[in-house]
Amino acid sequence: MQKKVALITGVTGQDGAYLSEFLLKKNYEVHGIKRRSSLFNTDRIDHLYQDPHVENQNFFLHYGDLTDSTNLTRIIQEVQPDEIYNLAAMSHVHVSFEMPEYTANVDGLGTLRILEAIRLLGLEKKTKIYQASTSELFGKAQEVPQSETTPFYPRSPYAVAKMYAYWITVNYREAYGLFACNGILFNHESPIRGETFVTRKITRAATKIALGLQGKLYIGNLDAKRDWGHAKDYIKLMWMILQANEAEDWVIATGKTTTVRDLVKLCFSYLGIDLEFRGKGSNEKGYIKSCNNKKYQVEIGKEVVSVDKKYYRPTEVDLLIGDASKAKKKLGWIPEYDLEGLVEDMMKSDLELMKREQFLKDSGYNIRNYFE
Ligand code: NDP
Ligand code: GDR
C-alpha cells in the first residue's frame, strides 16, 4: 500500500515534534517546514533526523516560512501531501502584544497562504488540512465551559490573528469544498514545552530552586485559570480529526481548570515542598512552609515566588475550561494524562535536566542563567 504523505508546518515546535513521531509510527512519509536560523533549531526533532544520503527515508525537512507564499506553494507542489497540519505560529500570547503585525502576518495570513496554495495547485480533493486553532478565541469567556458553539471574544493580537485563521479555514471549506478543519485546542504542555510558557517556567524554576540553582520564581497573574492537558494526548486528536468522515471543527480539552497559583503549589509539592502564599495582587508572595525531602537544602520561611507585573498582559484571559464531549463521543477520544500525570512527567524531566546543570556548575562550567 502506498504511504500517506503528511506536511507539518511548525515541525520544530512542541506539537510538531510529537506529531512527527506519531505519524512516522503510523508509517506516514513526513515532511516538515523549518525556518532558517543562525543556530540549529531542531533540538526537538533531532532524534527523528535521517541522513539525506541514505535510501528509504521517510522524514524530510524543507526550509520555509509562513510569510512566504511562493515558498509554501512550491513545497506543497513538490510534496503533494495527503494531509497538511498547519502548526506554525508566533504562539506566545504575551509576545503578540509586542509584535502584533508580525503575529497577524504569520498566524492569520499564513493560514490563508496555505489554503490558497491548495486551491491554486488544484489539490482541493486530495489534500486535507488541519488548522491549529486555540481556546484563546474564547478569550473573555461568554460561556462556561466553552464548546464548539461558544461565541468568540479574543483578547490579544495572537487570538485575533487566530480568529482570522479559524474563519478563513471554515470559509475555504464552505466555498471550495476543502476538507479543512479547526482543532480548537486548550492549553497542552509537556517536557518539551517552550521554556517561556507558564507551566514549563514553573517546572524549571521549582527544580532549580530545590537544587540551589535559582533563588526565586518571578511570575505574573496567579489568578488566571487554565484547562491544561498533555500534548501527547492532543496531537493524536489532530490526526483523528483528519480521519473523520466529515470536515468539522472540534474542541479539545480536559474539562478541568486550575489557577496558576495552584499549579505552582502542585509542582513544588512533587518535590516534597509545601508552599504558602501571602499578600494580594502584585504584592503576593510564596514562601516555603515545609520540606519533607532531605535531598533539597531549602530554607523554611524563605520567599521563593514573587509577582512581577511585567508578566501581566494588557488584556488577560481569566478563565478557560473546555467541553470536549463532541470529540469524545464522535471520535472516541480518551486522554491518558490528568493534571497530576502531566506535572509528574514535566517535573521528572526537568529534575533530570537541572541535575545535569548542577553537575556542570559544580564542575566549573557556566550554565544558562536567563529567566523570561
Ligand atoms: P511552538 O511555539 O512550540 O511551535 C511553533 C512552531 O512554529 C515552531 O516550529 C516555530 O519555529 C514555527 N514558526 C514560528 N513562526 C514561523 C514562521 N513565520 N514560519 C514558519 N514557522 C514558524 O507551538 P506549539 O507546538 O505549542 O503549538 C502548535 C500550534 O498550536 C501553534 O499554532 C499554536 O498557536 C497552536 N496552539 C497551541 C496550544 C498549546 O497549548 N500548545 C493550544 C492551542 C493552539 P521555530 O522552532 O523556528 O521557532
Ligand atoms: P497562554 O499560555 O497564554 O494560555 O497561551 P501561557 O503559559 O503563556 O500563560 C498561561 C496563563 O499564565 C499566566 N501567567 C504567565 N504566563 C507566562 N507565560 N509567564 C508568566 O510568568 C506568567 N505568570 C502568569 C498568563 O497570564 C496566562 O493567564 C498558550 C499558548 O500555547 C498559545 O499558543 C495557545 O493558543 C494557548 O495556550 C491555548
Image (spheres, grey):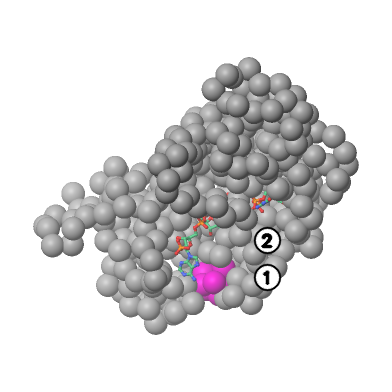
Q: CA distance from mark 1 to mark 2?
A: 7 Å
The answer to whether residue 354 is magenta is no
The amino acid sitting under disc 2 is His
Question: 95 or 305, which is in the foreground?
Answer: 305
* Residue 252: percent from left, percent from top: 58, 44
- Going by the image, does 285 lie left or right of 22? right
Using the rendered view, name the quadrant where residue 74 is placed. bottom left
Residue at 79% from the left image edge and 60% from the top image edge: 315
Q: Which residue is mark 1?
A: 98
Q: Is mark 2 within 8 Å of ligand 2?
A: yes
Position of 250 relative to 102 (above/below) = above
* Residue 32: percent from left, percent from top: 35, 61
Residue at 72% from the left image edge and 25% from the top image edge: 300
The answer to whether residue 37 of the structure is visible from this angle is: yes
* Residue 30: percent from left, percent from top: 30, 56
Which quadrant would the C terminus be assigned to in this image?
bottom right
Question: 3 or 155, which is in the foreground?
Answer: 155
* Residue range (magenta): 106-112
Q: Which residue is mark 2?
A: 94
Asked whether disc 1 touches disc 2, contact meaning CB atoms under 8 Å apart, the reply is yes
The amino acid sitting under disc 1 is Glu
Position of 344 relative to 174 (above/below) = above
Residue at 79% from the left image edge and 62% from the top image edge: 314
